[in-house]
């Protein structure tokens, strides 16, 4: 996806935008060519001037479901490419065959598309796999050996760990470090041809065993691993290490700005070392990509460890990867978050080089800001108790109304959206028996309480003013019904509606046409703001009230709700028809967010 090169940017600046704008101004990558697909230097040189002003990439490993932190990275990489007339590549870093699966590939592609991004640009699909480049990676490894920059090491894993040293002690050269180029080359080919056992040898870059950066102490770049790969099958029994593969993938794809999170900062020296060496050998395009790091997303009340998220699923603390309490993109989607709200959230939190915690309320506010102008309104009663209008039948008879099936009903209406008349109205009935919230009645009102209590008047929204007479209780003392008289000539929208002033307005639905629905009240999955940051077992920090399921009554307009359709339940917040379980005749709604952030208050 591309944007016009002269597009005027209105988004807040950050250090990544400043880097990109500097490179564009200086023409850092302006002379590079593009072969129409990823390629080595010689092939690219035969191509056309690169039509993309910048190239970024989103490179997940297909070993799990993406989460909200990945959503930030997706919005960042694809968004910057759009804003600066560039292209963002969709690439799978599939160099670890034992942990990867096509299921994850499919779910990742779906997540990126759902968030509103694509990888087609300039008539080309920029959808790639690291495994597509295994042949070149092998060729580059042989070049490093021939240049005296890599060797095959046959120490045990324990010996390698011991000889690596630590932060206070330099490493010790491997006894295989001085073996001849020809011997290392032959042993590497033996590794490739399956003549050595798994774990018997690795190929290491030859850099500096005394480097203060432990990542530069002759890092392993190839290992033996007999495993069927989801893309290449059994063609290879040796696989490149991620730290070796990733910079090569970037170089072949003509990436200009390789954006990653701060934990890769210590790997940048090797990233540059490797690409500098391959540039010197004429294998990759010049100038080569540069890596830039930004702070990962730390969202309160959320964990993003794939291993621990999997534990939540496997141990059935949640119903699956798409459980609406999960921070996975499939979970956020089912919960009811919109692509636009997540993009807005990513824009608002910005990009920095220092780690910090972002309050979960920021995500909910982005959702509210996105849905407020979009979501149809509806009334719903989540904790119902019956309200009986004691003088209703008499008033209807006196006014000459006819009963239908023994019931006197009045027609009421409300706008589908209060700020958009073009969306029309929704219609519902008013009758003798209504459902109201249990919390809307008190025998003795607390200070500031303006709802129903004996002798008080309130307006039933879009309906009539009533005066409370009290309540009926069962033998346990629980309220089973609230009694009230209707005040005549106070129907909303009629000339007398404003004759009586009231402080309280409550929502309701009529027993006659209310729709019974399952409503799932989701809240934070964890009870503490920064879970899994202490020695305490993270499972002990789960919020026991993260899900409450209630039987509610909703207005009849919701009978036509479709799965994934969002609404504002007036007074209660934003809800979505569950995309998996909602069905005609069996409505299921999930709470996405309340009308305001009240968590912990």
Image (spheres, rainbow, N blue to C red):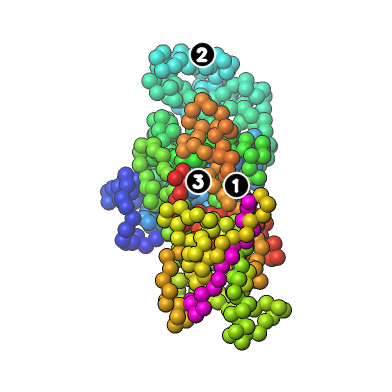
**Could you say whether the residue bearing mark 1 is in a helix, strand or loop?**
strand
- Residue 72 is at least partly visible in this image: no
Q: Which residue is mark 1?
A: 547
Q: Which residue is mark 3?
A: 68
Q: Which residue is mark 2?
A: 162
**Could you say whether the residue bearing mark 3 is in a helix, strand or loop?**
helix
Which mark is nearer the camera, 1 or 3? 1
Which mark is nearer the camera, 3 or 2? 3
**Could you say whether the residue bearing mark 2 is in a helix, strand or loop?**
helix
Q: Is residue 226 above or below residue 360?
A: above
Q: Which residues are magenta?
A: 477-493
| Residue 461 rendering spot, x and y as whole percentages | 50, 69
Which mark is nearer the camera, 1 or 2? 1
- Nearer the N terminus, badge 3 or badge 2? 3
Report the residue at 67% width, 54% height from top. Answer: 474
| Residue 431 rendering spot, x and y as whole percentages | 61, 74
């Amino acid at each position: 996806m591309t944007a016009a090169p002269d597009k005027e940017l209105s988004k807040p600046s950050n250090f990544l935008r400043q880097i990109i704008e500097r490179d564009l101004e200086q023409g850092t990558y302006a002379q590079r060519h593009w072969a129409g697909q990823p390629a080595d230097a010689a092939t690219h040189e035969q191509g056309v001037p690169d039509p993309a002003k910048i190239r970024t990439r989103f490179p997940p490993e297909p070993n799990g479901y993406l989460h909200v932190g990945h959503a930030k990275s997706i919005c960042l990489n694809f968004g910057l490419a759009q804003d600066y007339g560039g292209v963002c590549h969709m690439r799978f870093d599939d160099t670890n065959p034992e942990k990867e699966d096509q299921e994850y590939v499919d779910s990742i592609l779906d997540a990126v598309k759902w968030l509103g991004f694509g990888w087609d640009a300039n008539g080309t699909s920029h959808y790639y796999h690291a495994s597509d480049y295994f042949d070149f990676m092998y060729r580059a490894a042989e070049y490093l050996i021939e240049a005296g920059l890599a060797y095959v090491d046959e120490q045990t894993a324990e010996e390698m760990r011991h000889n690596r040293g630590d932060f206070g002690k330099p490493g010790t050269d491997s006894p295989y470090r001085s073996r001849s180029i020809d011997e290392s080359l032959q042993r590497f080919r033996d590794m490739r041809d399956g003549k050595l056992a798994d774990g018997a040898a690795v190929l290491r870059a030859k850099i500096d065993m005394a480097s203060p950066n432990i990542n530069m102490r002759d890092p392993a770049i190839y290992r033996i691993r007999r495993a069927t790969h989801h893309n290449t099958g059994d063609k290879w029994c040796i696989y490149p290490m991620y730290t070796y593969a990733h910079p090569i993938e970037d170089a072949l794809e003509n990436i200009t700005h390789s954006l990653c999170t701060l934990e890769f900062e210590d790997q940048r020296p090797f990233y540059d070392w490797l690409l500098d060496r391959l540039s010197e050998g004429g294998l990759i395009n010049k100038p080569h990509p540069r890596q830039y790091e930004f702070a990962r997303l730390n969202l309160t009340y959320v964990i993003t460890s794939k291993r621990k998220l999997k534990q939540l699923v496997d141990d059935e603390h949640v119903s699956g990867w798409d459980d609406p309490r999960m921070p996975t993109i499939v979970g956020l989607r089912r919960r009811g978050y919109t692509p636009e709200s997540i993009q807005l959230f990513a824009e608002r939190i910005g990009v920095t080089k220092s780690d910090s915690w972002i309050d979960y309320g920021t995500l909910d506010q982005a959702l509210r800001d996105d849905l407020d102008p979009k979501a149809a309104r509806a009334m719903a009663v989540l904790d119902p108790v019956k309200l009986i209008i004691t003088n209703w039948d008499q008033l209807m008879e006196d006014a000459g109304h006819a009963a239908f099936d023994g019931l006197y009903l009045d027609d009421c209406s409300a706008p589908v959206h209060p700020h958009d008349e073009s969306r029309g109205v929704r219609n519902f009935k008013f009758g003798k028996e209504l459902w109201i919230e249990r919390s809307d009645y008190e025998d003795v009102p607390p200070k500031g309480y303006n709802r129903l209590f004996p002798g008080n008047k309130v307006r039933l929204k879009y309906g009539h003013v009533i005066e409370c007479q009290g309540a009926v209780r069962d033998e346990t003392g629980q309220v089973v019904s609230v009694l009230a008289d209707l005040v005549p000539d106070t129907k909303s929208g009629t000339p007398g509606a404003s004759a009586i002033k009231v402080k309280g307005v409550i929502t309701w639905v009529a027993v006659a046409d209310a729709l019974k629905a399952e409503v799932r009240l989701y809240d934070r999955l964890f009870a503490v703001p920064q879970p899994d940051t202490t020695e305490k077992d993270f499972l002990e920090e789960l919020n026991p009230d993260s899900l409450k399921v209630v039987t509610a009554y909703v207005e009849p307009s919701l009978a036509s709700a479709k799965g994934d359709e969002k609404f504002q339940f007036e007074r209660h917040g934003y809800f979505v028809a569950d995309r998996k379980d909602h069905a005609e005749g069996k409505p299921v709604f999930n709470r996405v967010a309340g009308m305001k952030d009240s968590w912990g208050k």
